[in-house]
Structures are given as structure tokens and as C-alpha cells.
Image: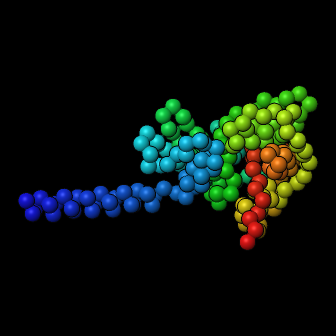
Amino acid sequence: MRKLTVLITLVLAFASINLTEAQEEIPSAVYTALDHLNEYLLVPINLTDQGVEWDWSVVELGDFGENCREREDKTAFLPDVAYDITFYRMAESYHYRVSMDEQLIVYCSDPVDVPENTIPAVADAMDDLNRRFHAGLTLNDIPWRWQETQFNDYTLDCPALTPPEEDFDQTIEGYIIEFTLLGQIREYRVSKDRLIVLYCEPEEEE
């Protein structure tokens, strides 16, 4: 009986080691994408939940948006190597593209329909706002404003993100869009090609 107990202990120990190694093999970009996704879900996804699966790979791209969220204009330079990540839960699936520095996080989806006399970036930001706050607002329901601008890089100068390396000098045309919701300004930054849609939260005060 003692030998059996020792054998079971050894098996459990090896299983624990293998599980730890498997967890270490998951790149941090998977968790970065998962954190982004959980900002939108009423019931968050955990990688250890029953029925949850995921896959990831490093892909070399002709364009960052290929097989993800096609860009309308491809003049701006973006990384050509990225993580391609998909989460599955029951009948749900969520596809992400994440740059190697984890500062460019793109939820892969078709661009939304654009109402008449509206710039596409505003429609994209409104769609994200509705998904994030589980609302069904239209542009007639809340105050909003926008301005066209030029950003230094693909972080669109959001203070919560880390700019790429110093030798990255590719500017990106885009828009700053502000919605007033529940008495607060919700700021978005959207690239002109409609690939990057960032909810740009204010920098936390120390």
C-alpha cells in the first residue's frame, strides 16, 4: 500500500510540473488579448474554465489586418509579425491580432456599417462604445465631437500604452472622438484606415 501511495504522489508531482510548464509556454500576448476581451464580456473568460479553448501562433504578414480586419488604406506602416490568437467558449469565438510588443491589439471583425453623413471612424468608435457598455446607443442619443489629427505611431498616443522603439518614425493619420456618457467624457482614437480603434482611458493620477 505504501508503494502505491508513493507512486501516486510521484505521478501527481510530475503532472503538476507538466501543468506549470504548459502554463509558462503561453505567451503573455494571450493574456493581453484576453484582458482586452474581458472588458466587453458580462461573463469573463478564464483560460482554465470548462469549455474554454484557445489557440495562438506567430504569423508573418503582408499586412497587419489580413484575415482579421481589412484596412481601407494601407499606406501607414505597421508590424509585419504578430500573434494571431483565438478564444473559444461554447458557440462563441473571438479572434485577435496582437503586435509582438503587445501595444497594438486588434479585435478581428468586419467594419461596421456607416450611417449617412458620418465619418467611418465615429461609427467604429460608437460600435465599440456600445459593445463595451452593453448599450444600444446611436449618434443621436449622446453628445459627441471629433477632430482629425496625426499620431506618432500605432499606439495613437494613448497614455496607457507604451510607444514602440525610438527608431519607429511612422506617423499614422486618425481621429480623436469624444462621447459624453453618464456625465463622463469617453475618448476614442481611431486610425484613418479603420484598423485601430482604441478606447483611450485617461492616465491614472499617482
144 relative to 158 in the view: left or right: right
Q: Nearer the viewer, residue 139 or 118?
A: 139
Q: Residue furthest top?
A: 116
Q: Residue furthest front?
A: 183
In the picture, measured across the screen, residue 93 lies left or right of residue 141, that is left
Locate residue 30, reporting x and y percent.
55, 52
Compared to residue 42, the image places residue 30 above or below, namely below
Position above or below: 53 against 20:
above
Q: Position of residue 5 (x, y in %)?
A: 14, 60
Task: For the N terminus, give its image quadrant.
Answer: bottom left
Taking the spot 53% from the left edge, 48% from the top edge, the residue there is 57
Q: Is residue 97 left or right of residue 127?
A: left
User: Which residue occupies the extreme bottom position in the image?
Assistant: 206
In percent of the image, x 68 and y 38: which residue is there? 134
The answer to which quarter of the image holds residue 201 is bottom right
Q: Residue lying farthest left?
A: 1
- Residue found 78% across the figure and 59% down from its top: 202
Q: Could you tell me residue 94's position as x and y percent? A: 58, 39
Q: Is residue 74 above or below residue 165?
A: above
Position of the C terminus by quadrant: bottom right
* Total numbered labels: 0
Please say which color scheme the image uses. rainbow
- The answer to whether any part of residue 39 appears in the image is yes
Q: Is residue 33 visible?
A: no
Q: Position of residue 195 (x, y in %)?
A: 75, 43
Nearest the viewer among 180 and 87 is 180
Which residue appears at 64% of the width and 43% of the height?
40
Would you say 28 lies left or right of 203 here? left
